[in-house]
Image: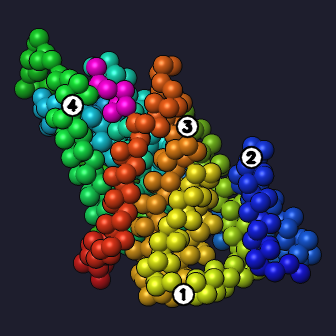
Amino acid sequence: MMSIEVLTGVLLVCILVTFALGAQVGFALGGIAMVIGYITWGDALFNVIPTTLEGTHFSFILLAIPLYIYMGQLLTRSGIGDAMFNASQMLIGRVRGSLAISVVIVCSMIGAMVGIIGAGIMTSGSIALRPMLERGYDKRLALGVIMAGGGLGILIPPSIPMIMFASATQNSVGRMFIAALVPALITIVLLITYIIISCKLNPKKAPLDEIPETPVTTKEKIMTARDGLLSLVLIVAVLGSIIMGIATPTESGAIGVVGAILLAILFKRFKPRMVQKAGFQAALLVSVAMWIIFGATVFSNFHLLMGVQNMVAGFTQDLGLPPIMVIIMFQIIMLLLGFIIDEFIIVLMCAPIFTPIAVSLGFDPIWFGILMILNIEIAVQTPPYGFALFYLKGIAPPGVTMLDIYRSVTPFVLIKLLVLIICMCFPELVMWLPNKVMG
């Protein structure tokens, strides 16, 4: 029988080797747990499989995931991104860097709808990157704001990693969603402040938009404002139904899907083929997500049953660190993991192990969950291996190199790191709103 320390080392080495070989994440994690588990336990391991399958694929909370992904797919195909973009531009007006500010605002809204980083970055980039480059924006600023705004998808509710965290740790999804609003607002304000200051210090970064030859009519302004407002109403309906206790996160996902279809009809973009394409793409993303969840849950359940929680708790006690230093240590571990694996797996591997220890040290699990989400958002965008960087490369024009992308994200990653430190130092910023709204 292997000790838990040796077992943890073996599991980590196996993960790194299988990922380096390019194995599918869900199969790699599940397969490693099965092989090592069979060597360690024998036939008793197979009792873990049915309970894990039942816990993941039949969870009412996780049923929200396909609904939010489908809603996101419908919205990206219905012209809602363009509607939000035009309304945001009209609201901001002719200011230096206005397009970049619009990108942060619109990307955060699109991110709120799609709920995952990859979809947020790719959707935002396909709408906004080319217009910025065509108008003479600095390449680094254009790339950086797409990454920063698109990455907000997991911080602004409804966020799929938040649903996974709540499911893995048996916490309230509603409280998680509400707790994320203040950190998200702080992040958006800091990002916009940085854009304004950097464009003022270096005007070459963002040329002023030219005054159109034919002025925009009042009717066009009203139509633009209406489309942007209706887009906003959908986000408010999805979030508001959860916050007010009218609907569960799963039910609010269904509200979002119906709302997205109604908006597509209103924007005259509704076609059976659009719904079919959105359905196929959503099914593909959901199947990938569910296999990852299943494989990662088998892995984490096996590791938990072998006593990894006690090992981590004992290790932190032996170090004699004060509680806040333990939290910082967890943040560093998750940051390093984010260089090699995506947000789903970090949540599913770390949440069941770290959260009970954080709670035993006297910290609120919702606060710790928000720190985890903030951390993951930074980790997956950090050079050289943050996987979100490769999403951005995938939609960037041919002349953009990986070095351009690394340089573009650095100031925005530092801003998000500052938000993480602020939320760690002042927990009341995170907990004030959920305590006020939900008690």
Q: Residue 153: give x, y in percent of width and height.
A: 41, 50
Residue 202 numbered mark, or none: 4
What kind of element bears circle 2?
helix
Q: Amino acid at mark 4?
A: Asn
Query: How far apart are the alpha carbons under marks 1 and 4?
Result: 48 Å
Residue visible at 19% across and 40% down in the picture:
196
Amino acid identity at mark 1: Gly
Distance in Å between CA atoms under marks 1 and 3: 40 Å
Can residue 239 be seen in the rendering of this structure? no
Kindly identify which residue carries mark 1: 320
Q: Nearer the viewer, mark 4 or mark 2?
A: 4
Q: Given the current orientation, which residue lies at the most extreme top position?
A: 213
Marks 4 and 3: CB-CB under 8 Å? Answer: no
Mark 2 → mark 1, Cα distance in angstroms:
35 Å
Closer to us: mark 4 or mark 3? Answer: 4
In primary-sequence order, the first of circles 4 and 3 is 4
The label number, if any, that marks residue 20 in the structure image: 2
Labels 1 & 3 near each other (Cβ < 8 A): no
Residue 407, picture quadrant: top left
- Secondary structure under the numbered disc 3 in the rendered image: helix
Left or right: 413 with respect to 266? right
Left or right for 337, reference 322: right
Name which residue lies at 51% across and 26% down.
401
Residue topped by disc 3: 390
2, 320: nearer the viewer: 320
Q: Earlier in the sequence, mark 1 or mark 3?
A: 1
The residue stretch that appears in magenta = 136-142
Q: Where is residue 378 drawn, in percent x and y?
A: 45, 53
